[in-house]
Amino acid sequence: MRIEKRYCIEFSGWDGVRDQSARVRVFRRMENPLSFDQVLRRRSAGGFAAEVALVFTTLGCGGDGDGDGDGTETSSDGGTPVTVSSADDSSSESSESSESSESSESSSGAVPEPSCGDNCSAPPEVLWQTTWGTDAWVWESAFASAVSPSGELAIGGPVDWPATGGLLAVYDVDGALLFADTLPEAVGGVAWDSDASFVTAGDVPSTGALVLSGRGRAGEVLWTSSDAPAAWVGSLGRSSNGDLLVGGGTSTTGFIGRFDASGASKSTTATPTDMFVADLAVHDGRFAVIGVDVSDRVWLGSYADDDTLEWSASLALLDANAVTVTADGTVIAAVRTPSGGSSLLRYNADGTEHDPSITMPWTESLITDVLPLDDGAVVVAASVVESGATHCSLSRINAEGVMTWGVSFAGLVLDGECVNVHLGPDGTLMASGSVFEASGDADAWAFRIGFE
């Protein structure tokens, strides 16, 4: 099924954009015969299977702010000018979608519906957005993020590419920076325990050591796992019994690690194929994982809560960075097709195909996150490539495969990727990723949007 686009909302400007000059970089996917250690941390930048020219531009976000730790922060509040165009206009083939690489929220329990569902009559408002990065000329991205029960956003990710370390920042519900610092480990997963504490999972780039830590709301370390095995980290989730699940890979296989709530290692599971677990999603005593193996095939697997593999699928596709499970147990795998576009493949809980699949309306794109809603709809985050530029896009797809709304950031940043999307307790959407400057520097990016 190719989704029907009802309409598209495109941001056409941003207060404080200082410079529209652009610099072009080319990302090349790292192919064999590189060692698997080298290809593990491809994620969104390396996830495009062909050479893709990405255009970067400066994002000037209002007045400059002071960041904590070693970094600097800029932010902006208030509504952003938008234009609404008809989805029937073939010239606007572009812009709804958003990307993600990892689901740190468990899908058990009620999920609030965004305040704009099937029948949106007005464009959203940017409630706040912010960037954070070090003063050095390095690439920083919020590859991982999670929202607390009260709406605070914790973001984490790598510093530089290939990564030399990591970053961690926490924002309150209004976008004020509570904590930010650089870390020895590149953060690949974040999960809140409560309003007072959260867990981060990452790996030390030089050694591959897995670092699992509990942290307070202000970023202070409460505990660190002392017996975590070596692995590169791609995702973090929480099982139905409260255990922490870490997905990633080693030099020889995909990795699923189970830890108790205090970080003590309980078990490790190797995937049956040599791969990297880019994302995992937990639902009703089961969890699904997805990634790409060394033969460049997408591998999708569903596990019982005792870590037994129930079913799997090996697919001749280019890439996969996101998987989720809806309220009725449907597994949705976000994949990149051989043509360069993106699709949502749907499977029943027993592994049989749930037809039809959903073809997204972009020629060149990579989905990096899929957020399930209680009514069977999903919010999709993606990087969409158009006219040599890459932009962040968010869209809602209902259970019938219809795109009911889409929000594109194509007009405000010539290159900006949103890697994770979350639903706040008040029905607003929060996302994290990165934006690029004309100099080639990149900073972690987070924003919150709401609907009237």
Image (cartoon, rainbow, N blue to C red):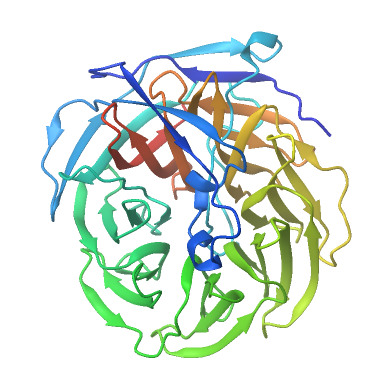
Considering the image in quadrants, where does the N terminus appear? top right
Left-right relation of 296 to 77: right
Within the image, what quadrant is residue 213 found in? bottom left
With respect to residue 41, does 310 lie above or below? Answer: below
Say which residue appears at 35% left-offset and 42% top-offset.
446
Say which residue appears at 34% left-offset and 89% top-offset.
226
Left-right relation of 339 to 24: right
Say which residue appears at 73% left-offset and 70% top-offset.
302
Q: Nearer the viewer, residue 440 or 222?
A: 440
Residue 392 visible? The answer is no
Say which residue appears at 14% left-offset and 46% top-offset.
67
Position in image of residue 244 (x %, y %):
49, 77
Left-right relation of 80 to 292: left
Residue that protrudes farthest toward the left in the picture: 66
Residue 248 visible? The answer is yes
Within the image, what quadrant is residue 331 found in? bottom right
Position in image of residue 347 (x %, y %):
81, 56
Position in image of residue 264 (x %, y %):
42, 89
Q: Nearer the viewer, residue 33 or 383?
A: 33
With respect to residue 294, does 415 lie above or below? Answer: above
Left-right relation of 141 to 452: left
Position in image of residue 204 (x %, y %):
34, 71
Q: Nearer the viewer, residue 425 or 265?
A: 265
